[in-house]
């Protein structure tokens, strides 16, 4: 098994005496889909944001695709990780003044120095994969929330990442738009993309996750396969959470 992400005793505090991450350790294998669940404030988003250097660690160590990060938070490894790890957030964060095509090609052209024609061809392929090729020349405000989130996924994929991180990607969507985004993520999983997904979508977790990790108060409460977690969670805190979600 090749390990894509290895976290060892991660610690993160925003205020003295309170830890958003309190000694979190885990491994994510290449090609695995890990779904992270837990109540609000449990540390899920903080954890996933450490995986591409958006949150600076106060303690512990990360190994992401062979690149090490620790509390020193040196710029070079952070840049290296961000070149290889894509992230999709709750909000779409698209540039409103750029077309959909330009939103997707901006980073490949400016950061990776790809020829514009090559970047545009790749962008069209990704929009086709997301089922919204016909939206290429529109602007974000002309698209639905679900379409904008699929553009955000295409934008992340345009850099050809080895790992994709999703931080509650459907939480800002109307219920009828959730399925189209989850379907795009399901296809990524089928294609073998390594994914860490923070979500409350129980159906997605049951169907797509290789493992489910439950967090509370900055700690990992339990980790298991979806069938075991949803039908026979080991910990009382997990069972209480699931009973509130149904």
Image (tube, rainbow, N blue to C red):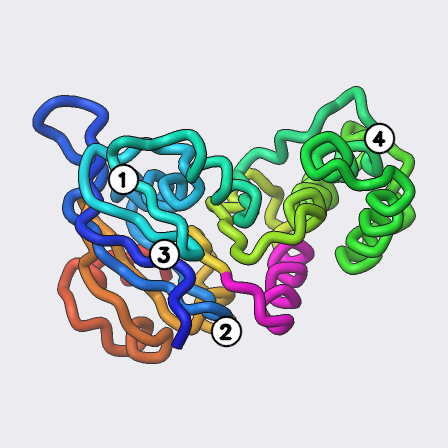
Up the image or down, 97 lies above or below 218; here it is: above
Q: Earlier in the sequence, mark 1 or mark 4?
A: 1
Q: State the image quarter where residue 16 is shown.
A: top left
Q: CA distance from mark 3 to mark 2?
A: 14 Å
* Image vertical order of residue 232 relative to residue 243, above or below: below
Residue 182, magenta (yes or no): yes
Q: CA gap, disc 1 to disc 3?
A: 22 Å
| Image spot of residue 240 (x, y percent) | 21, 59
* Marks 2 & 1, CB-CB < 8 Å contact: no
Q: How far is the residue under mark 4 from the one under mark 2?
A: 34 Å
Tell me which numbered mark, 1 or 3, is placed earlier along the sequence: 3
Q: CA distance from mark 2 to mark 1?
A: 34 Å
Give the answer, above or below, for where 110 lies relative to 144. above
The alpha-carbon separation of the residues under discs 4 and 3 comes to 33 Å
**Is 94 a magenta residue?**
no
Circle 4 SS class: loop
Give the number of the disc on residue 36: 3
Q: What stretch of residues is rendered in magenta?
A: 179-194
Which residue is drawn at the image coordinates 79% and 20% (left, top)?
97
Read off the residue under disc 2.
207
Name the residue carrying label 4. Answer: 99
Q: Secondary structure at mark 2?
A: helix
Q: Main secondary structure of the magenta part?
A: helix
SS category of the residue bearing label 1: strand
Of labels 2 and 1, the one closer to you: 1
Residue at image location 72% in from the left, 43% down from the top: 151
Residue 50 falls in image quadrant: top left
User: Could you say which is closer to the camera, residue 171 or residue 174?
Assistant: 171
Label 3 CA crowd tier, 10 Å (few <14, some 14–19, many 20+): many
């Amino acid at each position: 098994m090749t390990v894509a992400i290895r976290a060892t005793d991660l610690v993160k505090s925003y205020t003295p005496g309170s830890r958003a991450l309190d000694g979190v350790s885990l491994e994510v294998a290449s090609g695995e889909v890990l779904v992270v669940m837990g109540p609000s404030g449990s540390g899920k988003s903080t954890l996933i944001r450490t995986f591409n250097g958006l949150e600076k660690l106060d303690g512990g160590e990360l190994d992401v695709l062979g690149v090490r990060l620790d509390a020193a938070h040196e710029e070079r490894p952070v840049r290296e990780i961000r070149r290889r790890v894509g992230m999709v957030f709750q909000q779409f964060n698209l540039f409103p003044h750029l077309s959909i095509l330009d939103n997707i090609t901006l980073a490949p052209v400016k950061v990776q120095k790809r020829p514009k024609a090559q970047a545009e061809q790749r962008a069209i392929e990704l929009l086709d994969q997301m089922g919204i090729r016909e939206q290429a020349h529109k602007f974000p405000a002309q698209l639905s929330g679900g379409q904008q989130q699929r553009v955000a996924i295409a934008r992340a994929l345009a850099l050809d990442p080895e790992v994709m991180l999703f931080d509650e990607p459907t939480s800002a969507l109307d219920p009828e738009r959730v399925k189209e985004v989850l379907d795009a993520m399901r296809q990524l999983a089928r294609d073998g993309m390594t994914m860490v997904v923070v979500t409350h979508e129980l159906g997605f977790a049951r169907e797509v996750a290789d493992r489910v990790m439950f967090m509370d108060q900055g700690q990992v409460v339990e980790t298991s396969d979806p069938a075991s977690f949803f039908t026979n969670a080991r910990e009382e805190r997990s069972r209480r959470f699931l009973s509130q979600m149904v």
